[in-house]
Image (spheres, rainbow, N blue to C red):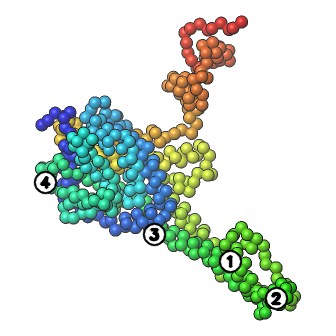
Amino acid sequence: MTSRRRRGPRELTAAAARFVERRLSRAKEPNQSWQEAAWEYYSTTPEVRFAATWAGNAMGGARLYAGRRSADGTSIEPAPDGHRATEIVAAIAGGPLGQSQLLAAFGPHLVVAGEGWILIRPTETPTGDGDGQEWRVLSVLEMRRQGNDLTAEIDGEEVKIPAGDPDRIDPEGPVAIRVWDPHPRKHLEADSPVRASLGLLEELRVLSASVIAIARSRLAGRGVLLLPQGARFPSSGEPGGDEDDLMEVFLEVAQAAIRDPESAAAAVPILLEVPPETIGQIQRLTFESAFDDTAIRLREEAIRRFATGLEVPAEILLGLGDANHWSAWALQEEAIRLGVEPKLATVADALTTQWLRPILEAENVPDAHEWLVWYDTAPLRVRTNRAQVALEAFGLGLISGAAARRETGFDEADAPTAAEAAQARATAGRRGGDGEGLPVEETTRPPEEPAA
């Protein structure tokens, strides 16, 4: 066997493909009939697209790293620099930028269809050595099963992924890794928030169509105006002038209002002089029903029900307008914990079992089964009152004065001189404190003499 350092990405592909090929050759076709409808709602329903895109953007802000569970099982300890697991995870999707894009792409797949595929293909590098890799995230609609083979559609091109003998791996072949959130009833099937809301989304579609129809009817059909027969405008007073037909005048004014909504015809009422006894005969009939306003309320309720069916607080979809900065921070924390981290764990588990560990086992790395791909969501957790936290951290000696100034909105030009720092400590001492907790520089030099 070649040395560990000389094993190239092509051999890594082969190691991962062994697991995928065995799995595909035995697997039954899962139920996917609902996923096409789910993706259709993603394309036509803004609320679905927002929920899916939000999850993807949040996942893209996390960081992947190699690690293993601590002895007490409560945390994941990062693998040391130079460890083989660290090298393999660092190379996933070409590095941090590619990993961010990979994770971001998976958000919509797990929210909408509950399932996605990772396809890795060996590619030529600019130097022509053939050691590069292309990582793609594909939807379930882009993968087709044919016997023991898979066919992936990439940019209109069909890429066949044969399920050959696991003991005779083609190092040039692509690797397909299915990643899915299993349904509690049938583990092989995918589950997603949209799957549980398909009926509700159909209701939302019908209600939205009703609201559109109501809006169009109120714009195009304003009802029926009943006029007494023979009602006309007086003539213009010109010789030979005839009385204008009332219906023709109404039509002309309506056409002018449609052509120019800002014209006087759209706002000023038509003045009509009629005999007093005929005024009561002028009536307007409308075809509006009580359902018109009800449809709008039902649509709002359907949107709220869909929001509560997501795996994040409903306020993420409905808006945080009524939340103060502390409650908004708490909601975002809960959204990361309940809606983002479980999806990251799903992707990380797939990369662990079908990519990292098969490579480590093929290379005879000790304790290969202990190492895993994990995630760090620290970049997503932005504290609301970061300035106060920075001052507290400075007081505990956890950050420098420069960091405290940066987080409180000051720069290095605002740093105190040695004399000012000493004076601040002296003032704090007279007040009964020791000066700790203030973002001032510490120095052993004597204070400068004040200028005369």
Which class describes the residues within 10 Å of circle 1: few (<14), some (14-19), or many (20+)? some
In the image, 181 versus 351, the foreground residue is 351
Residue 165, disc: 4
Residue for badge 3: 199
Q: In the image, 156: left or right of 61?
A: left
Q: Which mark is residue 241?
A: 2
Of the two numbered discs 4 and 3 on the same chain, state the one appearing first in sequence: 4
- Which quadrant of the structure image shows residue 249? bottom right
- Mark 2 residue type: Gly
Q: Earlier in the sequence, mark 4 or mark 2?
A: 4
Q: Are marks 4 and 2 in contact (CB under 8 Å)?
A: no
Examine the rendered structure and indicate whether residue 221 appears above or below residue 60: below
Q: Nearer the viewer, residue 333 or 80?
A: 80
Who is closer to the viewer here, 355 or 185? 355
Q: Residue at x 44, y 62 (%)?
A: 42
Mark 2 neighbour density, 10 Å: few (under 14) some (14–19) many (20 or more)? few
Q: Residues within 10 Å of mark 3 (few under 14, many from 20)?
A: few
Q: Nearer the viewer, mark 2 or mark 1?
A: 2
Q: Earlier in the sequence, mark 2 or mark 1?
A: 2
Which residue position is annotated with label 1?
255
The amino acid type of the residue labelled 4 equals Asp
| Residue located at (68% from left, 82% from top) | 223
CA distance for labels 4 and 3: 43 Å
Cα–Cα span, label 3 and label 1: 42 Å
